Image: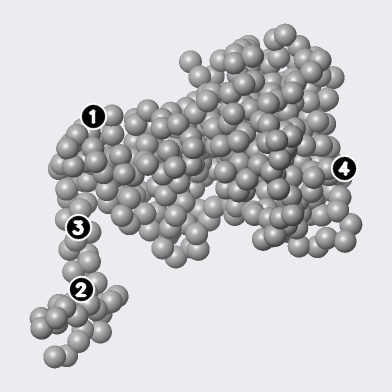
Amino acid sequence: MRKSSFRIVTFHAPRRGLKFSVTAWLVVASAALLASSLWFLPGPAGGSGLFGAVDALTWSSVVRQGVPLMDQSSSPAQVAGEQSWAAFLFYHLTDVDPTRPTSILGWTVPGMAFTDYPIAVDGRTVDLRPPEDGAPSPGLFQHEQPTSSSSSTAPNLSSTSSDPLVYVYHTHNRESFLPMLPGRTSFDDAYDKAKNITLIGTALVDDLKKLGITAIHTTVDYWPMGDYSKMYVFSRKTVNEVLQKYPGLKLIIDMHRDSDPRDLTTTTINGQTYAKIRIIIGGNNPNYQANERLAEALKGELDRLYPHLVRDIWAKRSTTYDATYNQDLSPNMLLIEIGGPENTEAELDRTATCLADGIAALLKDQGDLRLAR
């Protein structure tokens, strides 16, 4: 039998020579898309029977990571705008969102088949190559073993205001910068126990206090507590404790650094170099829209005060793991990345001062920052 030259893959079933060509795949895809437009079954909050089981299996990954299962209405199926279970199932199986055909780029850009990053630009979304998630070199600090004294997630706040407005913490607290670490040259080695992103968090809190804004800061070292991928589980406990003590917080920042090279993480303003800012929104959470409005408002203030300091705002969601970043805990929470591995401490400090100015302007414009209403 002559095989068609227009196909992706051929499967031969015993005795029957069954083949799946590109044409067959397109028929299956078209049927799924047709079903998504006609079969308006209840969404995640009202699913039952088979689809309820699919829902439970799909979101079990959230529970496996130790994060409490959120209200099912916050699933990526709804966040992405799907209106039926067929559309959600198609997205789950193919990583292609039927409502956004450009998501097929996930097949061609490494890593995007597992994570969906729409970029927020003036209220619109345009699919572009996402930011890269950095990770430490295998074996870095591997000799450190968790101990009873190094496994506490307690915030250990001291000398704080009774009514702070801003809270800064660091899930990846040992993310660092090569200019601070003589002898290290690899981005994967830009991690350190003492010289790290927490220093920039301290600078931001000090700058806020100079502007009359009460702010608190935690620097819990999550590194020795276990697997790097579980650090959001650890930091979640800290944030929960802080929120219980200070429920009136108006802005919560999980401060990180980016993983891009210097040419992408640096800008020049009035002849001085600054580390750029990037804002990440966790798309798998019920506060997604409120978090995004907050991010856009902060970016607007910074764009006015310091043009080109903010690179972009990315909304990250995933069908394979919980892309929440603990932002389900508060509608006033943001993940902010400052600079990259090649930025200097002076550049980072200058950016911290700019960020404090932007936060002050935002608090002034929004009264008490009740953007979640």
Tell me, for residue 46, which label it has, or none: 1
Instruction: Provide residue 22's location: percent of width, then percent of height.
Output: 24, 72
Residue drawn at point x = 71 percent, y = 55 percent = 142
Q: Single out the residue that lies furthest toward the front.
A: 148
Residue nearest the observer in this picture, 40 or 307: 40
Whichever of callouts 3 and 2 sits on the residue coming sooner in the sequence is 2
* Residue at (76% x, 62% y) in the render: 186
213 or 244: nearer the viewer: 244
Q: Which mark is on residue 20?
A: 2
Give the spatial CA distance, label 3 vs label 2: 15 Å
Among the 4 quarters of the image, the one containing residue 15: bottom left
**Mark 4 crowd level (few <14, some 14–19, many ≥20, 10 Å Cα):** few
Instruction: Name the amino acid, label 3.
Output: Ser
CA–CA distance in space, label 4 to label 2: 59 Å
- Among numbered discs 4 and 2, the one appearing first in the sequence: 2
Q: Residue furthest top?
A: 162
